Amino acid sequence: MRIFVAPFAVRAYVAVAAVGLTTPLVGAFLVQRRLALVGDGIGHLAFAGVALGVAAGVAPVWGALAIAVLGAFTLERLRTAGRVAGDLALALVFYGGLAVGAVVLSAKHRFDASAIGVLFGSVLTASWTDVIVVVVLCVAVAATIVPFYRQLLAVALDEETARAAGLPVDGLNLLTVLLTAFLVVAGMRVVGLLLVAALLVIPVAAGSRLAHSFRDTITWGMTVGVISCIAGLVFALGQGSIAPGGTIVIASLVAFVAAAFAGRRAVRKHPRQAAR
Amino acid sequence: MQLSLSLDGVRFGYGASPVLDGADLAIGAGEFVVLAGHNGSGKSTLLKLCVGLLRPGAGTVRVLGGDPSDATIRRRIGYAPQGLRVVTSIPVSVGEVVTAGLTPTAAMLGRDGDTERSRARAALAAVGMADLAGECLFELSGGQQQRTILARALVADPPLLLLDEPTTGIDQSLRPRLAAELRARADAGATVLAVSHDPDDFHAVLDRILVIADGTIRQLTHEQFHAHFEVP
């Protein structure tokens, strides 16, 4: 029972629920546009931000946020300018971010267990201040997505036609990666920078197996996301010595497999499919 | 006659050789024009110049009285590109795709309501898909997907329709219905420019056939088209 009511557990539940609910909101647009690895790239960059924050004497979360936002902006500019291929730009960011983080933290003699916490999550040691930062970031993302949903969807469906129709496509693409940067930093405490991209992608992939529309995919993704986060955290707390970041991602993978199985059964039962 | 679309001495190329080489064109409000030509002759390029996706190397393109680089002008164009360009990672409903055609003219921070859904249903009814708004686009046939893209171009009732091969993949039996729908739009004042390999799809309803060849545009009668310019 303690795993449900202990103060540290309550703080962890609030943080993981916020991240689990919000990541599919942005992840759906990334997956639809085949930019699923953007979250990974920004996560790796944010590690450099944590290190630079430590070096500058500011809280790691602010260093991570500053570099993640700057990296998201740069990544999108490189991609749209066509100067670097999308996968090459991501690879440069992946390795550069991790390398800078490792070098700076080592130089500051801080390449220790706290670095592992940044990479794989440390939600059980989160303070209420940490949780409030996570929730505020998630609420800011959701509050931005809702009014721009139609424009973002039009671009995600067909970028060229959206551009032909006069929508500010470049600005909306930039908004998407900036919101991704916010969620990467929010998820840093929950599942860590190396695993946060999984929450952007896997619940959406699960939802896409169950839905017939983009909106339903997001709804299912949010459901899978929050259930996976809570279930993974409960399992980790029950075991006592397992990292919640790993169990949360594994729970979402289990949900994906279940959704894929359920989705195939649903397709077989769909009258339009049966008629073919 | 008030012009909806005009090209004046337009030159454009994707390299050294020009695709359009001094192309001139004038289409008035309420006209239904079909633009034909061989593969690679520049038909799709011309439409992309008209919606601002490409910029002419020389000459002038005017659309609805303005420059197509102006987003406020482009929001008044119903554009259906060639083929299905909707990416396939996540299921999308037919209604979502069609309603996306209303997004450019909607309030920036607005949300879809009954009015938008009603207009989407009307556009789908116009292409013979009234009951399919809730279906997943990728569970439909190629012809139904093409009609969905056409409905997206129609949904905002734009004063100018630029349609690239709008009947590709659509059953022969349905094509007269679509042609009649486009004619009705033209009779109501909209200008229709449809790129097509086969103007016969629109023979009964079109006003003019234009043919693009060697970088320029010329007008042919239906008989001249078949006698002198058969498109393979």
Image (cartoon, grey):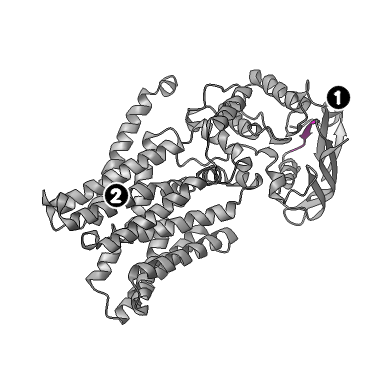
Answer yes or no: are tags 1 and 2 on the same subunit.
no
Amino acid, disc 1: Glu
Q: Is residue A253 visible?
A: no
Give the total of numbered labels: 2
Q: Is residue B216 visible?
A: yes
Dots 1, 2 in contact, CB < 8 A? no
Estimate the spatial distance between the alpha carbons at disc 1 and disc 2, rounded to whole Å. Answer: 69 Å
Residue drawn at x 68%, y 23% as measured from the top left: B178
Looking at the rendered image, the disc whose residue lies closer to the viewer, 1 or 2, is: 2
| Residue A216 shown left or right of residue B176 in the figure | left
What secondary structure predominates along the stretch shown in magenta? strand
- For label 2, the SS is helix
| Residue B13 shown left or right of residue A72 in the figure | right
Q: Position of residue B98 (x, y in %)?
A: 57, 33
Task: Establish if A66 lies above or below A151.
Answer: below
Near mark 2 (Cα within 10 A), the count class, few <14, some 14-19 or many ≥20, is many
Residue A241: assigned label: none
Residue drawn at x 76%, y 57% as measured from the top left: B16
Q: Which residue is mark 2?
A: A17
Please state, as top left, top right, bottom left or bottom right, where the C terminus of chain B lies in the image. Answer: top right
* Residue B28 located within the stretch drawn in magenta: no
Residue drawn at x 70%, y 45% as measured from the top left: B74
Of all chains, the one bearing label 2 is A
The magenta span reads: B32-38
From this viewpoint, which residue is outermost toward the left? A1
Q: Which residue is mark 1?
A: B223
Q: Position of residue B99 (x, y in %)?
A: 56, 35
Amino acid, disc 2: Ala
Please state, as top left, top right, bottom left or bottom right, where the N terminus of chain B lies in the image. Answer: top right
